Image (cartoon, rainbow, N blue to C red):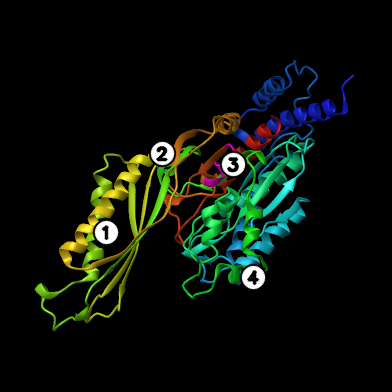
């Protein structure tokens, strides 16, 4: 006679099989109902190890609109639009900076949805938010998903947000279908994936991954208004002592897997007409701050041979970045000079100071580091040739690349195949919290197309159909991983 644990496990198996049928039913004409039942039967047999001859193929939910396993696309879009209203810039742009009033409102909104879903909610010291659906074997490592909702100035409303609200919709779908997870399922809203306020990308997930260096540096970190990190956190309701940052650190066995849903932020999927991207690796990013100091002077009175122009030194370095990146020999090497500031910033004044911030990325860490070293050598040569002082060349972060785990890739591929969605194995050149979650958990990412690859601008857009496809793949991948 089966034990209660075995009974729960078999119920979960049946739930997974029903879930597959319902997915196909909700997809309408994409997959035939008979094929759905057969696929569900095969999957149940694969999980259970015995023939599922007694399984009833309609799953109790029928097909089409009668299925409880469907994406509420209208509701998801409504939530995205509502979240976008918490912004410090006018529609259609979104500006939502860490620990601002709008960020606090967005956090409250996300916790409200988690509460409606019956998830157990907790927050850590820096405001990473966790909503957990307890599994039948809650002592096992959980399957997690999630992303961020902070937004750089004048950006769009889909970056990160699809991975949070879409994840909550995936949980809603699984609950509606009657699925019972074995491993707990958890949705995470990460704090400050964007570096806007303190110049630190993926602040919350870096700390979760145990970054001692970041925990130390935050003690001295201030924003451009000279507000300390801890004062800013306090203003948002996260009052903490510096030593409490260590409480954010997680152990490697806390999560069995992490899967992040995200817009591609590039044009490949849309251009090729492919519905799903299965991410195999995240490029290794590095950030550099450079400052030159010259003599300055009057734009009319100082003759060209006598100038020590910090602005031209910065401009020359920007071109050197492009040159060294192109000389790497790989299309995967990219470099960007995203910030170039001149002092005093007057049209009739020769710049006496310049500040440059550089982003270099590659899936090959050695090749990326080689570009960084060449950029450093160019900065030294430019300072000598132009008679300016290279007052700072500081590598802010130099993170290694992250590889998606084979087990998570397999679950994502399985889901896409069951849904009859064409998918493409691809790398992510953009920064994501998954880069740091990979340090403590097997990781994977699901990409969906976005309009012309636009991101970090108001024109950023993902269609309801593409979001629904991503949510379905996420739900099914999480369900599969939960049963392992």
- Mark 4: give few (<14), some (14-19) or many (20+) Cα within 10 Å: some
In magenta stretch: residue 441: yes
Q: Earlier in the sequence, mark 2 or mark 1?
A: 2
Counting from the top left corner in percent of width and height, residue 302 is at: 13, 80
Counting from the top left corner in percent of width and height, residue 254 is at: 67, 41
- SS for dot 1: helix
- Mark 3: give few (<14), some (14-19) or many (20+) Cα within 10 Å: many
Counting from the top left corner in percent of width and height, residue 252 is at: 63, 40
Q: Earlier in the sequence, mark 4 or mark 2?
A: 4
User: Nearer the observer, disc 1 or disc 4?
Assistant: 4
Res 100 seen here: no
Query: Which mark, by number, is residue 437?
Result: none
Q: Residue at x 18, y 68 (%)?
A: 387
Q: Earlier in the sequence, mark 1 or mark 4?
A: 4
Q: Are marks 3 and 2 in contact (CB under 8 Å)?
A: no
Q: Are marks 2 and 1 in contact (CB under 8 Å)?
A: no
User: Nearer the observer, disc 2 or disc 1?
Assistant: 1
* Image position of 158 with respect to 436: above or below: below
Q: Earlier in the sequence, mark 4 or mark 3?
A: 4
In magenta stretch: residue 144: no
Direction from residue 79 to residue 262 in the image, left or right: left
Calculate the distance from the C-alpha at mark 4 to the C-alpha at mark 3.
Answer: 28 Å
Query: Which mark, by number, is residue 272?
Result: 2
Q: Earlier in the sequence, mark 3 or mark 1?
A: 1
Query: Which mark, by number, is residue 318?
Result: 1
Would you identify the image quadrant in which residue 25 lies? Answer: top right
Q: Which residue is mark 3?
A: 440
Which quadrant of the rendered structure holds the N terminus? Answer: top right
């Amino acid at each position: 006679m089966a034990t209660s644990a075995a009974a729960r496990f078999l119920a979960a198996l049946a739930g997974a099989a029903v879930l597959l049928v319902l997915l196909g039913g909700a997809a309408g004409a994409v997959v035939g109902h008979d094929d759905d039942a057969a696929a569900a039967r095969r999957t149940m047999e694969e999980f259970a190890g015995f023939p599922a001859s007694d399984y009833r193929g309609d799953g109790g939910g029928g097909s089409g609109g009668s299925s409880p396993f469907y994406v509420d696309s209208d509701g998801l879009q409504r939530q995205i639009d509502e979240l976008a209203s918490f912004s410090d810039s006018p529609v259609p742009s979104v500006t939502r900076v860490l620990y601002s009033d709008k960020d606090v409102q967005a956090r409250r909104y996300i916790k409200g949805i988690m509460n409606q879903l019956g998830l157990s909610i907790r927050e850590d010291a820096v405001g990473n938010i966790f909503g957990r659906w307890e599994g039948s074997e809650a002592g096992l490592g959980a399957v997690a998903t999630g992303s961020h909702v902070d937004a750089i100035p004048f950006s769009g409303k889909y970056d990160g947000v699809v991975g949070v609200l879409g994840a909550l919709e995936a949980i809603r779908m699984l609950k509606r279908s009657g699925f019972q997870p074995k491993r707990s399922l958890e949705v995470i809203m990460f704090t400050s994936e964007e570096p806007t306020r303190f110049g630190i990308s993926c602040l919350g997930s870096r700390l979760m991954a145990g970054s001692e260096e970041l925990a130390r540096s935050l003690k001295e970190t201030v924003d451009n208004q000279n507000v300390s990190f801890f004062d800013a956190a306090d203003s948002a309701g996260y009052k903490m002592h510096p030593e409490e940052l260590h409480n954010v650190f997680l152990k490697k066995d806390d999560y069995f897997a992490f899967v992040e849903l995200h817009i591609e932020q590039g044009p490949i999927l849309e251009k090729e007409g492919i519905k799903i991207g299965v991410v195999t690796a995240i490029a290794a990013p590095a950030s550099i701050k450079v400052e030159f100091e010259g003599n300055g002077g009057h734009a009319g009175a100082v003759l060209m041979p006598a100038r020590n122009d910090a602005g031209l030194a910065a401009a020359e370095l920007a071109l050197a970045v492009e040159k060294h990146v192109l000389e790497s020999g790989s299309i995967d090497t990219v470099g960007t000079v995203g910030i170039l500031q001149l002092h005093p910033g007057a049209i009739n004044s020769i710049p006496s100071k310049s500040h440059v911030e550089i982003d270099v990325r590659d899936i090959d860490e050695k090749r990326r580091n080689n570009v960084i070293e060449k950029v450093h050598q160019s900065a030294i040569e430019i300072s000598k040739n132009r008679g300016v002082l290279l007052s700072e060349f500081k590598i802010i972060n130099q993170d290694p690349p992250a590889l998606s785990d084979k087990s998570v890739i397999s679950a994502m591929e399985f889901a896409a195949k069951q849904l009859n969605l064409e998918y493409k194995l691809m790398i992510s050149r953009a920064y994501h919290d998954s880069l740091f979650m990979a340090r403590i958990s097997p990781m994977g990412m699901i990409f969906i197309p976005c309009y012309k690859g636009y991101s970090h601008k108001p024109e950023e857009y993902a269609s309801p159909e593409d979001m629904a496809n991503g949510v379905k793949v996420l739900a099914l991948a999480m369900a599969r991983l939960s049963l392992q």
